[in-house]
Amino acid sequence: MSAGFHSSARTVPVSPERPLLIVDADEVLLRFAEGLDRFLHARDLYLDLTSYRLHGNVKRRDDDSALIDIEVTALLEEFRADLDSLEAVEDAVETLHGLQKRVQVVGLSNVTAAQAPARLRNFERLGFDFPLLVNSGPKGPAVQALAKRSGRPVFFIDDIPHHLASAAAHDPDVLRIHLIGDDRLKPLLPPAEHEDRRQAGTLAAEAGVHILAVTHRWPTVDAGTVAAEATEAAERLDLVPVVADLLVTRGMTLVLLGRSYEGTGAMEASVINLLQPGDHAVFVNGGKFGERWGKLLASFGMVPHEVKVEWGRAVRPEQVEDALKQNSSSRAIFVQASETSTCAVHPIKALGEVAKRRGVMLVVDGITSVGVFEQKMDEWGVDALVTGSQKALMLPPGLGMIALSPRAWDAAKKSTTGRFYLDLNRELKAQSQDHTTAFTPAVSLIAGLNKSLEMIHAEGLERVYARHAVMAEATREAGLALGLKLVSPDNPAPGVTGLLAPDGIDTGKVVRYMRDTLGVSVAGGQDQMKGHLVRIGHMGNLSPFDMLVAVSGLEIALQHQGMNVKIGAGVAAVQARIARGV
């Protein structure tokens, strides 16, 4: 089809070989302009937030602090909404580009012929090259004339979700329109025509297919089973001995932080209870969550010393020991057992030996390791191990847990760092003496944890760890069979696998296609890995056979993005690994 504007439907070139997609051109430009406005608004919000952060050390009156905190929270929510809106519009425009290669696209506009050249220039700036029919509304007689000349199905963007059952079975091109243009084109519609169909996997849901989530942020949960004993378990805190089995500890004291936060809250609690302002500490930065240790330490007045590790690599024990020698007043080492952002594991046992030699505490983030592979707190010399409910414990976010050694509890009793809500001494007293929590707990999550632990121990810890190992090995072998590379080839995590795509393949688009079209939820990369990495989670209530679905979806999505993939190669690798057994 050639570009240009037309005053009559008779002059618009149409072909009987492909379906005709009618686009309200005026609405497309309006939505894109609004998206840019939201971006500019987001920029202003960012400057406001930065201002709060820069002046966060200004002393505030107690009666004002809550109001300021509420205002900052509101700004953050508005900022995120603006960015989400812009991204949705950009995705919609990109989707329309993809459709233009497969179907006939004709734009309709109410502008006059005199105004049409300017309107066409705007479309050219967006990279579009389709004919524009002017002096015509989206539901006028011109559409009927185009349909009559084409002899093929004619669709509007807002019609696409409704045609799968009737037309797609008889026309592969119609199915293609639906697959590519369903939900992602909705930001180009007038707001009044938007439908509430934002749930992941619209197409899969319509077909009655189970939607599978294989992402470390969203483990698959049997909600009915987990909540079954909520009423019975809500009145007691009898979980500590059971969780202790996961941590392989008898000398530690565990505190449940059952309130409205998750693993990061437990990380913060470990920092402010074990150290004081001015204390020095060494932290391992091998990814986004290692970086978080440094930010937490600095936020509360401690002096952090970074051990920088290449993403995807494990820290070497001698790196940490050298850092402790150079900063001999350091009181603790902070590290991840499993760095989720890079899908790598660190040598906690060896770091425990370093900590013992140097006489410092070892604080470990076990959020994606507890319940995935063995943790031996006592044997490895770990002083504090934190975890959260939303990973291998198969629950929604919102419940943090910390186990502390006697040495760590002594440090907590002596710490003068300001704290109230996250005061572990207060929490331990409430839980050990009063058999309750210091503040209102997340009762439903504690009840759910009771059931989750029953499920884990019914399976048996050895079998749980073996199941995670099989899923991880199957996913890694599948990625290699598809021509992808492991982001962490030497020390891969058992709970999440990171696969690097070849240059030219945008993994952000792969992730969105898998989620929105195929109903399979995985994660992308962060920071410098964004657009290059696909992360497939395999922890919690998943089986090796679920990896068949995940890898099958990955194959289809990679091929859709233009990668030369042998369909079935990854699935065969998963099958072969399952066949070998544990």
Image (spheres, rainbow, N blue to C red):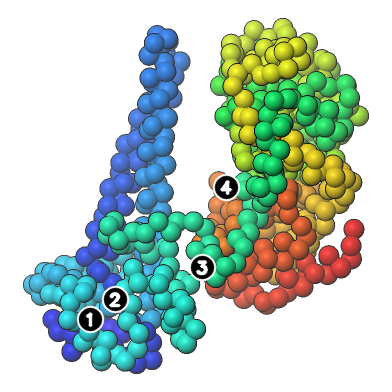
Q: Is residue 321 left or right of residue 120?
A: right
Query: What residue does disc 4 label?
Result: 526
Q: Give the CA separation, mark 4 to mark 3.
A: 32 Å
SS of the residue under disc 4:
loop
Q: Give the CA separation, mark 2 to mark 3.
A: 24 Å
Along the viewing direction, whichever of 268 and 159 lies nearer the viewer: 159
Please give the name of the residue rendered at 73% of the width and 44% of the height, measured from the top-left corner: 392
Query: Residue 504's image quarter?
Result: bottom right
Q: Position of residue 331 (x, y in %)?
A: 75, 17
Instruction: Pick whichever of labels 4 and 3 is earlier in the sequence.
Output: 3
User: How many marks are shown on the rendered structure?
Assistant: 4
Q: Give the CA separation, mark 2 to mark 1.
A: 8 Å
Instruction: Pick whichever of labels 2 and 1 is earlier in the sequence.
Output: 2
Q: Position of residue 79 (x, y in %)?
A: 39, 39
Please give the name of the residue rendered at 24% of the width and 68% of the height, measured from the top-left corner: 25
Q: Nearer the viewer, mark 4 or mark 1?
A: 1
The amino acid pointed to by label 3 is Glu
Query: What residue does disc 3 label?
Result: 206
Q: Position of residue 397 (x, y in %)?
A: 61, 38
The amino acid pointed to by label 4 is Gln
